[in-house]
Amino acid sequence: MLFYDWEKIFDAADGNPRSMYLILKMMTQNSIPDSRHSEIYKYSFKDFSGKSFLIHPDLLLYNAYRHSYREIAQYLALASMRPLADYATTGESSLDVRLIEFDLELITTNSLLSIKNDKVHFLYEEANQETIH
């Protein structure tokens, strides 16, 4: 499980989806830059930890080649809206659509997200054991 602060990531990346992906990858893999010219060097000294969470960030990274940087950034943004307390008490990893403050059209066009029963479901958050191993 990865804990992150969406606002810190968004600000550090200046809203650039590719940079957001690099930060996610750096955090998930505990990467350190090999030189000052590395793409992650400028992010390596910042603390991006927070109360937002991803249950399986490794699966998202493993399958990232199937999705655009924009879709991954939207996935991170929506995942950050989920209450950690709900997941801790019920194990529910989806997000109620009533908590979303923007057009749901973004969700329906994102291959990482789906809406069922008024809940946003995250493709790699609800992975079963066969998918993980």
Image (cartoon, rainbow, N blue to C red):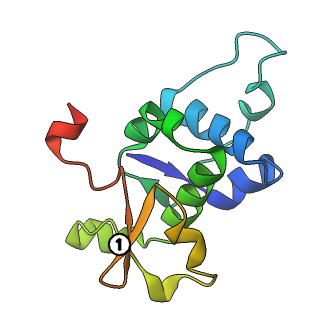
Label 1, residues with CA under 10 Å away: few <14, some 14-19, many ≥20 = few
* Residue 25 screen position, x and y as percent: 57, 33
The residue type indicated by label 1 comes to Ala
Identify which residue, 71 or 2, lies in the foreground: 71
Q: Is residue 133 above or below residue 82?
A: above
> Which residue is depicted at the point 70% across and 17% down?
33
> Which residue is depicted at the point 83% across and 51% down?
14
Q: Which residue is mark 1?
A: 85
On the picture, is 32 further left or further right than 91? Answer: right
* Residue 104 screen position, x and y as percent: 55, 79
- The image quadrant where one finds the N terminus is top left
Q: Is residue 14 above or below residue 31?
A: below
* Residue 131 screen position, x and y as percent: 22, 39
On the picture, is 86 further left or further right than 20? Answer: left
> Which residue is depicted at the point 64% across and 20% down?
32
Identify which residue, 18 or 80, lies in the foreground: 18
* Residue 50 screen position, x and y as percent: 56, 56
